[in-house]
Image (cartoon, helix red, strand yellow):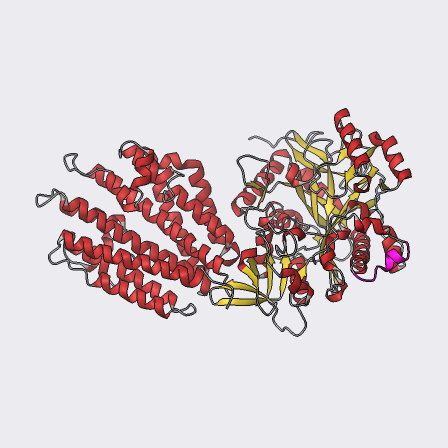
Amino acid sequence: MLLARAAESLYWAARYLERAEDTARIVREHTNLIVDLPTVVPVTWAPLLAITGEELTFTSRFERADELSVLRFLVADRENRSSIVSAIAQARENLRIVRELVPNELWHAVNDLYLYIAGNNAEGVVRASRRRFLDRVISECQLAAGITSGTMSRSEPHAFIRLGTYIERSDMTTRVIDVNAATIGAQGEGVMHGNVQWASVLRSVAGLQMFRRSTHASATGETVVAFLFADELFPRSVVFCAEQVSRSLRTLPNPTALVDQCRVLGSLARSIEVQPLDLVSLRRSVDDVQRASADLHAAVTAQYFAVEAEV
Amino acid sequence: MLTDQPLTARTDLSSGAKTEFFDELLDAHDEPRPAAAAVVEQLRKLGRSELESRQNLADLEILTQGITFAVYDDGTNIDRPWPFDVIPRVIDASEWKSIEAGLTQRLVALNRFIDDIYNERLVIEAGVFPIELIRDSVNYRPECRNVRPKYGAWAHISGSDVVRDSDGQVYVLEDNLRVPSGVSYMLENRAISKIAFADLFARQSVQPVDGYVDKLRELLCALAPDGIRDPCVVVLTPGIYNSAYFEHSFLARRMGIELVEGHDLSVGEDGYVYMRTISGRERVDVIYRRIDDMFLDPSELRADSTLGVAGLMQAWRDGKVAIANAPGAGVADDKVVYAWVPDLIRFYMDEEPLVPNVPTWRCLYPDELRFVLDNMRELVVKPANESGGYGVMIGDRASDEELAATRAAVLANPRNWIAQPILALSVVPTLCDDGVAPRHVDLRPFILSGPFSYVTRGGLTRVARREGSLIVNSSQGGGSKDTWVVDMTHPIPDTTFA
């Protein structure tokens, strides 16, 4: 018997935790990439803004998309609701509302992370300490996931956490592909160090090691896009996420219509054309996947959170 | 090798010059009282830096566990970490037994009074209680007339504040019957104590406090309308911005029941209360409400309330949902009604009060009003319905302006004011900025009333943090201590988990 409002808080707590972890990993990897590549390669910080979808908020508050401004925005800016500090704060606020429903240790882990970030977010901005800061954010988010997985009963509250986690993750993976395909594609046929850039894309979603084990090929647009959209086994691929959402939905009341929507999302991801990788049609396919993902989120909200009291 | 800083006169727990106050741990010769002997001996051995590191350990635990409370007049913080002092307050179990009996007696009488006021009004017919007090009472709810809740219980959960004067006598200072808070902090204080002072618990038998939650749950379930096998009980909270939210969440969690807000509930066409779940609506049988009466039902009480549920009062009157504490219980939560409690005990139970009231002058009566006006500098003058310590004037330390303002307020509305002697509240050694020093304390035990009565083993000890201060409320900067009821005769192993 789960309150609609509690289900909504669980869902959003999970989405914000996933968002914080994914953002931290993307920023960490992008720092590595910029350090790695010769300066002649035209890689900038602007793509990170595109990934998080907060370009308008950024341009209204900062003048240039230089490293410090973008980092400040993505790590420490309270006005950016998708920044790491905002995401963790919101995850904590939501968890506070449903403290009774989640393992005590989960609350402690997120509360600890919140206290750390609140006190140290400047460290996430400057290069000297950035790595250590981001590593900590990532590992503490993984700790939270481990606590949930290891000690939380697989009842309805857990299902909503999984829904939030995988819907957010699928969305993030899609954006990472979308933006990077455009950035790298924009460098044209003569792209320098294409392998390095595509390997970096994989690292930004913790996928390089698993990619190498499963795909005995080098990291190119074709192989990476195919892997991140459609690999059945990698836990951050869109197809995998859709399947997890589907499984969780089946433990909830009246899931049929929603499960169908997962199927749609999954098959869209599976049917992405990569041979050859045509940027225009990739764009269209990515749009379809993102629309299906947004529809799924809207349907979950309508079905479980916006409940009318009258029968 | 550095040796630990030796205990000096400031840190060896002695009361020093303040021998006019009763010290809960030490007698007039700075020797430990029998029940406190093990505690005092251990604390004296620890030394100041070790004591401070235990305090730091406790503070860290409070921070990481997120044990907080909220204060409104602070511009930045919503939440503050709960203020806790490691040195416990100790009560001998045999003394506690008599206090317990007195509190139980008191709450039986108060519940009978409330039930009587909303029904036959025998106490008024008998001339024991003046009807004007009901007519003028801010907390009397005409909407509750002729309602008979189960067991005749209205104030199911109450907190009666208890103090000790310098003569060693324990008094009840006031009864909180509406939405008393603090029990979660009592429970958390024990959990923190067990972490900071695990070694101390091994040396004596301290009565466990965790039984309260089970008893509360049992009580709430018993209130459900008859015939329901597995009652649905919820805690109704105003939400996370309420200063006591931590407690609402804590209790819901410990009892394993839902924590709901007003807009999660609605009253169906059948007159029952329902909550919105992911499967649709589910019926609710018992509501433990942590919302003030006036906000419970916008269709009958305050129309601007967004915290309550339209139609809830009617559902309650129809017996379709139980509410703890019942609406209207606050008629007895009134500093003026307090003065009549000994008479109520005599009237309803034909017994003398086992724990006395503080002597109280009622400004409602002209001769008592005159006494108060003539002696304001020696009295504590209190308005009937402020909570949190606001509006209280302590005669021997108030400025001339405060005194004049209070005098004017009393003359403007005498019914709303009482006065009591300035008590020399007892003290307990407390870790302060410059070492261990005595600070004034009071005690809030919690009493459950329904098909059974139950009193917590001890309660929440609140301590004033500034030297000489008598204001102990957390909303005004007070702190708290764990309260140990120590059994000197039959050891009870403390096997509860933190």
Q: Which residue is drawn at 44% across and 44% down?
A: A89
Using the image, determine if residue B225 lies above or below residue B388: below
Range covered by the magenta-colored residues: B119-127
Picture layout, residue A245 above or below residue B174 = below
Q: Where is residue A203 in the image (x, y as percent from the top left)?
A: 25, 49
In this rendering, does residue A275 appear at all? yes
Please tell me which residue lies in front, B380 or B318. B318
* Image x and y of residue B224, in percent: 66, 67
| Residue found at x 44% / y 47% | A90
Residue B446 vertical position relative to residue B165 in the rendered view, above or below: below
Left or right: residue A207 versus residue A121 is left
> What residue appears at the point 91 percent right and 57 percent down from the top-left corner?
B126
Instruction: Identify which residue, B9 or A135, lies in the foreground.
Output: A135
> Splitting the image into 4 quarters, where does residue B473 fall?
top right
* Res. A234 in view: no
Is residue B115 rendered magenta in the image?
Answer: no
**Quadrant position of residue B326:** bottom right
**Residue sitting nearer the eye, B401 or B100:** B401
Nearer-the-camera pick, B20 or B419: B419
Residue B472 pos. (x, y %): 70, 39
Residue A63 in the image, given as x and y percentages of width and height? 29, 31
Vertically, is B87 above or below B451?
above
